[in-house]
Image: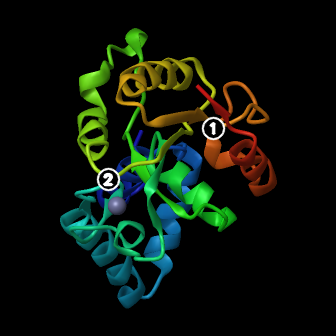
Amino acid sequence: MDYYSSQISRLIEELAKLPGVGAKSAQRLAFHIINQPLEDVKRLSDAILEAKKNVRYCSQCCTLTDEELCPICRNPKRDQSTIMVVENSRDLAAYEKTAKFEGVYHVLQGAISPMLGIGPNDIRLKELMTRLQGDIKEVIIATNSSLEGETTAMYISKLIKPTGIKVSRIASGVPVGGDLEYIDEVTLLRALEGRVEL
Ligand code: ZN
């Protein structure tokens, strides 16, 4: 039964496809948008379109950016010889919030998951190995402590070991199965400082 005009229904339907937005929230958002001044709605829709058109992966660390190199890779004050490997750009943002890590990142854009059929070639691992041909002192593996995160960490450390580059894993303290992005900054810092060499 369609209670609303077909255009409102369409808007609700599209919003409901977004992650974390259920049917009720989609309705609330749709009515909020309809009640907003036209310019505000235009700003929102422009922001979505522009981001979609221009955002791409940083050519060095594979995080999402709208330029060839992201601001972190471009920053001359960052230590380019220490790379922290994270699963996604949200985890990078979580570590950046601590403002204590001075190295650079490598964003895998996923984790190895045999169950989901995601193998080493499906994440940005080749790009990491290419970077390691440069002058790199340490690789800190900061994947999540989920099964996938641990599998990925193990796989990467085995790949890097033969190169002689120091590999470390962030300490536990990050709860098992916990997503990095939901963990507070103090815990993240403690995990980084207490990292162990693999
Ligand atoms: Zn970058």
Would you place residue 59 above or below residue 74 in this image?
A: above
Q: In terms of sequence position, does the residue under pointer 2 or pointer 1 come before the other?
A: 2
The reply to whether residue 195 is visible in this rendering is yes
Please tell me whether mark 2 sits on a helix, a strand or a loop. Answer: helix
Residue plotted at (31% across, 18% down): 119
The quarter of the picture where residue 44 lies is: bottom left
Q: Is residue 153 left or right of residue 60?
A: right
Q: How is the image coloured?
A: rainbow
Would you place residue 159 above or below residue 58 in this image?
A: above
Report the disc number at residue 10. 2
- Quadrant where the C terminus sits is top right
Crowding at mark 2 (Cα within 10 Å: few <14, some 14-19, many 20+): few
Q: Which residue is mark 1?
A: 179
The x, y position of residue 110, in whole percent, is 40, 34
Residue plotted at (24% across, 34% down): 126
Would you place residue 188 above or below residue 145 in this image?
A: below
The x, y position of residue 154, in whole percent, is 50, 19
Q: Is residue 149 left or right of residue 132?
A: right
Q: Nearer the viewer, residue 18 or 135?
A: 135
The quarter of the picture where residue 169 lies is: top right
Q: Amino acid at mark 1?
A: Asp
The quarter of the picture where residue 114 lies is: top left
The image quadrant where one finds ligand 1 is: bottom left
Please tell me whether mark 1 sits on a helix, a strand or a loop. Answer: loop
Asked if the residue at tag 1 contacts the one at tag 2, i.e. Cβ–Cβ closer than 8 Å, the answer is: no
